Image (cartoon, rainbow, N blue to C red):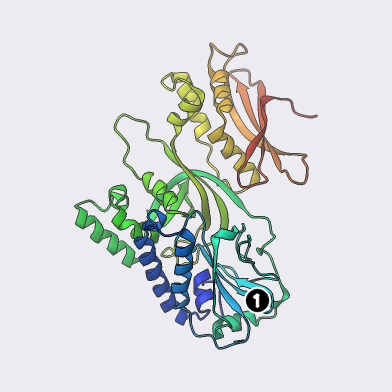
Amino acid sequence: MINTREMACHTWALSGNPIAGKLINQAYTSLMDEIGLNYEYGENLKGKALAAIQQETMDKIRLLCEGRKRQLNDIVYLCGGFRNGQVCPEHLWLENHTTGRTHDTFINQEVRRVDRIGVDGQPFQPGCEAEAFSGNEIARVQVNGYTDGQFASLSDAILMQGCSCGCSGSTPNYVYAIGNIHPHFPSKGVEMEYKVASESLGKAVTEYFEILSQKKYTYLANRICWVMNIGNMESYIIKPRSNKQLQDIIDTLKPTVPDTPTDNFSIVVGVLRPTAAPSMCNGLQLPIVMCTQHFNFNYLEHVCKITELDIKDEVTSSALSTMESRANNGDDENERAINYLAFRSPEIYKKAVQMKHPDREPEGVHFLKEISTQSVASDNNSKVVEVIYTYQKCPTGEQVSWSCSVDVAGQFPFITSALSQYVPMD
């Protein structure tokens, strides 16, 4: 049986052979660099329609395909999914328009089968994608039949039983994570290429922003693995979906201005994918997050902006610091709700300052003791989490709680009930 678990989607869609696939992978990567640089990764289309460029890209990718030898009478299309104005596909899959079946894969997953195919101009969700591509984000080229490697991997009886865990129709695992992002070289070759770039600019190798922000080195930034640290732990490999997201991530490497707060963070909203294969990021095995949105912010400046609080006030600054230090991975419903409120809700910060400020809280100074969560009954289309902030009075130990509810059913949470005093149910 062919082992497909270490194959990227494009390696399987173009070859399916672990040995020949390595050469095809190199050719594919070089082609994507060439196309990306030519169109400045979607920033300069040179007067062409985006759809025409995407179709042109798929025509060039088809030339990399290993020769088809099996089921040559089957009408098979090599399909590419492009998001957010990409000129290079984010995902590749095969649609068999004779059998009505779609197959694709992703690193650390088996080949997936979906018993349906796409229609030009209409949305479609291949098996390994958590979300459908819209009709104008898909380009197809006809290839017909399968390679020996593809056919061998499809011949396994388990795969022919149809859609299994992780296929289209399963609930996507969303992420709403807060942390810091840094570059990690996927290979010695990329690291040495980066070193040459730093020398050509007269920069130290640690001056990542000064080097990678240069347009001529965007190809290097696209090759680099972007790792998110949460609470000083490497937690995710972040895959930007557009050149703008990539530039936003590079901006997080910008040196801080003297005498300004240094607690800068990134927020990544995205879809959780399986753990990266060892070959992807030079042995670094972390879960992959396909980035949908990225925000870069300075914690104190952001809170000051949304609350109009005076962060120079000692009590205010102290209260805010207790809210900042509660790190989590943001990969389940409760943590996503907590992180969403930490970024979007001014009320939780105003309450934290009020509870700790002796001039604003008539009942005495309170310290934030814990943040907890509980599920709230809701309809089938909602998934509501109540986030509870419990404060403890000093020195009596009396406790009082405030809560706010967030719907986390979709990728983008939203508040369903404003912050109000919480009374536990007996």
Kind of residue sitting beneath label 1: His
Provide residue 403's location: percent of width, then percent of height. Answer: 67, 29
- Kindly tell me whether residue 227 is visible in this rendering: yes
Provide residue 246's location: percent of width, then percent of height. Answer: 41, 52
> Secondary structure beneath disc 1?
loop
Q: How many marks?
A: 1
Provide residue 378's location: percent of width, then percent of height. Answer: 77, 40
Viewer-nearest residue: 284 or 240: 240
- Quadrant where the C terminus is found in the figure: top right
Viewer-nearest residue: 338 or 315: 338
Q: Which residue is mark 1?
A: 97
Which quadrant holds residue 273? bottom right
Residue beneath the point at 38% across and 62% down? 36
- Kindly tell me whether residue 279 is visible in this rendering: no
Q: Is residue 321 above or below residue 375?
A: above
Q: Is residue 372 above or below residue 228?
A: above
Viewer-nearest residue: 189 or 216: 216
- Quadrant where the N terminus is found in the figure: bottom right
Relative horizontal placement of residue 74, taking residue 283 as reference (left or right): right
Residue beneath the point at 59% across and 60% down? 135
Residue beneath the point at 57% across and 82% down? 146
Provide residue 219's location: percent of width, then percent of height. Answer: 35, 60
Q: Is residue 293 above or below residue 198?
A: above
In the orientation shown, which residue stands out farthest toward the bottom? Answer: 69
In the orientation shown, which residue stands out farthest toward the right? Answer: 426
Judge the density around disc 1: few (<14), some (14-19), many (≥20) Cα neighbours within 10 Å.
Answer: some
